[in-house]
Amino acid sequence: MKVYIEPIGRLINEFTRLPGVGQKTAQRFAYKIINMTDEEAKNFANAIISAKTDVHYCKKCGNYSEGDICDICKKRSSETVCVVKEPKDVIAIEKLNEFDGVYHVLHGTISPMDGVGPNDIKIKELLERIAEGTVKEVILATNPDVEGEATAMYISSLIKPLGIKVSRLAHGIPIGTDLEYADEMTLSRAFIDRKTL
């Protein structure tokens, strides 16, 4: 027996494709949209389409951007580069107002178990940025899990021989925690107390 009419069933199915959204939450989301005014529903749909079509990766750092180069890369000195796993980590660090350098987003971490090697993430692009000659320090801010640590150590082994200062966030962040879920005080302390590798 068919529980939902086709448009509602399709909407619920699409919501369940989002991370952390189960059947009941998807159902609540679907009913909320159905009860929106036409204008609210159009605004919601347009926001999704705009996010998909207007958001790009910055050609310098790999962060989200509306143009070719993000505002952070346009306005800040590139002497200090903070290396993170993904764009949402940039947001977590930016909320602290502790860092005034630029970022480099790897778009992943080294994970042989998942078939992800150094050539599958943006390490080559980081080395190209360093080769430009303006970088004085690289802060490795990958997650403090096995993959993040392995990635940090690998990148450190490539950069240290170049005479560039390499530091790592202090381990005030519990092992196994993603940066986006760390509370701001812990993340702030870890950032301030970073150590040279």
Image (tube, rainbow, N blue to C red):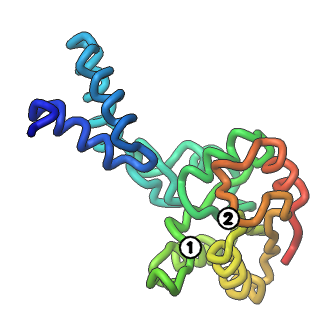
Which residue carries the number 2 mark?
143
Which residue is at the front of the view, 19 or 95? 19
Q: Nearer the viewer, residue 35 or 118?
A: 35
Residue at the spot 23% in from the left edge and 19% down from the top edge: 34
Reply above or below: 125 against 143. below
Q: Residues within 10 Å of mark 1 (few under 14, many from 20)?
A: many
User: Where does residue 117 sit, x and y in percent of width and height?
Assistant: 50, 85
Find residue 24 and report its horizontal and vertical position in percent: 37, 36
Residue 80 shows which numbered tag? none
Disc 1 + disc 2, Cβ < 8 Å: yes
| Quadrant assignment for the C terminus | bottom right
* Kind of residue at disc 1: Thr
Kindly identify which residue carries mark 1.
109
Residue plotted at (81% across, 70% down): 167
Q: Is residue 149 above or below residue 169?
A: below
Dot 2 falls on a residue whose secondary structure is: loop
